[in-house]
Every structure is written in C-alpha cells, then in structure tokens.
Amino acid sequence: MRAARLLLEPPNHAGLALYRYLKEHDASKQAARALLDSIAARSIAKVYENAFERWKAALSGAVFLEATARTPLAIGLGNASPIENGLSIHHTYGTPYLPGSALKGLMARAARHYGLDEHQQEILLGTTQKAAHLVYWDGWLDPSSRQPFQKDVITVHHPDYYSGGQRWPTDFDDPNPVGFLSVKPGTKFCLALSSSSENATDWLYTAAEILRWGLEHLGLGGKTNAGYGYFEVRLPPKPKSQAELGEELYQGYKTRIERIKPNNERGELNFFLQELRDKPAPLRKPTLEAIRKHLQDWRVWNPGRNPQHAEIEQLLEE
C-alpha cells in the first residue's frame, strides 16, 4: 500500500515525503500545495549534523568552499517527481545537495571565461580518455541551515498552447500555477575539492577560484535566466608556499644580516647556521643568499678557506 494512502503525516525526510506522500492528483492541486507546505516547514534531521562532520573529516586534505545561496536554487528540476518538478535531495538524509557532476559542468563553463589552455583544462577537467587530477565532491548542506526548503511556483500563462499548440496564446488564457520545491535564499552549502596527485595545492585553489566565479556569475541548476541559482562564495585562505614563508623568514632576519661585520661575523654566522641548517631548502634559501651577498659586498666571502662560508654554499646548492 502506498504511504500516501495511509493517514500519516509526511516524514522529516524531504525526499521520502516528496516522492511517496502525495495523497492525490486533484484538479485544484490542494494536496500538492499541502505537501509542499509540510516539507518547507520541517527542519533537517539531527543525525545529519554528525554525518556532515564525518564527511568533512573523511576529506581532511580537501579544499572547502562555503557557498551561500543569494537567490532561490532549483537544481534537479528534471528529476522524476509526482508533482511534475523534482529537486536534488540527498537519498539518505533528505537534505538538498549540489551534485558533483553539476559543479564540474559549471567549472567547465567557467574555465572558458578564464581562457585556460588545453593542458590546464586536462588537469582540472580531464578528457574523454583521461580522468581529471581533481575530484569535485557533492556539495553538502551546512547544518546551520536548519530549514532549507521553500514552496515555489512556476506559472504557465498559456496552458492550452503549451500542451498541444491547438490554440494560439492570447491575453485571455487562464494562468496555471504549478507548485514545486526549491531551496530558499540564505541556505549555506559546503563544497569540497580534492586531489590524490602530488603538489596539487595550487591547482586546487585555482579550481576553487574558477568555481567561485561560476557560482557567482553563471549560476547553478535550472532557471538561472530567471535569477535562480546564484551564490555568494567564501574561499579558504590559501596556505603560503615554502618560498613565501622563506621570504617572510628573511624579512625577519634582514636587519640582523645588515649588522654583520668582520668583527662579529663568526658569532653571527654560527647563529644563522644553527637556525637554518635543519630547515627545508626553499625556506632557508632567501636568508642564506642575503648573507652571502652581504659578505660579498664586504669583500670577505671566501668559501675556499672559511668553513662557515663553505657550509652556507653547500646548503644553497642542496
């Protein structure tokens, strides 16, 4: 027996309610409107918060974006539905989500705006013969958006014309409002990009920037020409490269390097070698190069006879 035929209230799971709890197809569409009102008024399940945290923990190496809907979102309108228009709803938790395939498709559109060459597009998007180096995960609803759904409407102004074209559209036709479910403005999603390739950090942040532009300027899902599907996106701060950290380290030592003179050279070089010897090569390089240049300007640089100079030269060559 269909759940809709039982005298039961629709469950908190929006997908189950939408696809199984429409009681009847009445001409006035009262049953559909009541069902949409019921779904829009319900909050997400409490268990979803734990699932969301587990999902983020499982993607510990990913780059996360925060995308907040500025306009209503109608993604998955073409999905099968008893009320004619569907919506992308998570099968397990009944929350709206942004399919990874849709995000990657938007990424491909936005990439054209950035003028990426063939090699760059192959890395970010892949080809028909080769997978991309990046993974575009489904965007999950942020649990802080407790009531993400709203009842929406599409109004067909000329139903007879669109249903068969037997009558020409006129100003005397009766509009036919069709209710559907959409995601309300202000709803927040968490998007994740990851890669199993080495040294892919720069590519991940490049993809995040391109995706941000697409979500803010092209929109996602259906009815974007009508203003649906636009977001405000916040990117995570990009971690500094070792070269940038090395430049910062040098700036911190710059004044002390400038004070090195022949009468204090030995003690100062001993200090710097102890500080820098065990640091990664890109991190120590700017400081050691500055020390070498300073000693060359003083005309005391002699790695052939001075063991401290020789060690600096060796560290720079590694």
Image: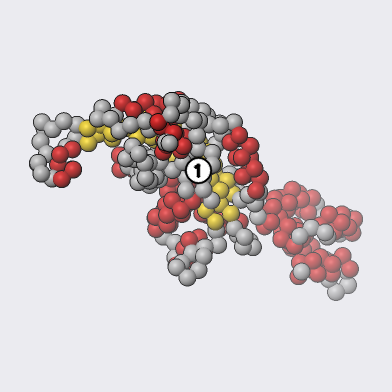
Residue 24 place in picture, x, y as percent: 33, 31
Name the residue type under label 1. Answer: His
Category of crowding for the residue at label 1, using alpha-carbon neighbours closer than 10 angstroms: few (below 14), some (14–19), many (at least 20): few
Residue 190 place in picture, x, y as percent: 54, 42
Residue with the mark numbered 1: 91
> Residue 144 or 114: which is nearer the viewer?
144
Residue 150 place in picture, x, y as percent: 40, 30
Extreme residue in the front direction: 1
Q: Residue at x 63, y 49 (%)?
A: 59
> Residue 105 or 300: which is nearer the viewer?
105
Image quadrant containing the C terminus = bottom right
Query: Where is residue 72, by image quadrant?
Result: top left
Reply above or below: 279 against 58. below
> Residue 22 or 188: which is nearer the viewer?
22
Regarding residue 263, the answer to whether it shows in the image is: no
Q: Is residue 117 left or right of residue 265?
A: left
Residue 168 place in picture, x, y as percent: 9, 41
Regarding residue 77, the answer to whether it shows in the image is: yes
Image quadrant containing the N terminus = top left
Q: Residue at x 54, y 38 (%)?
A: 93
Query: Where is residue 70, by image quadrant?
Result: top left
Reply above or below: 275 against 229. below
Q: Residue at x 13, y 32 (%)?
A: 173
Reply above or below: 189 against 192. above
Extreme residue in the bottom direction: 304
Query: Where is residue 27, by image quadrant?
Result: top left
Q: Residue at x 90, y 55 (%)?
A: 267
Q: Which element is circle 1 on?
A: loop
Q: Is residue 67 left or right of residue 247?
A: left
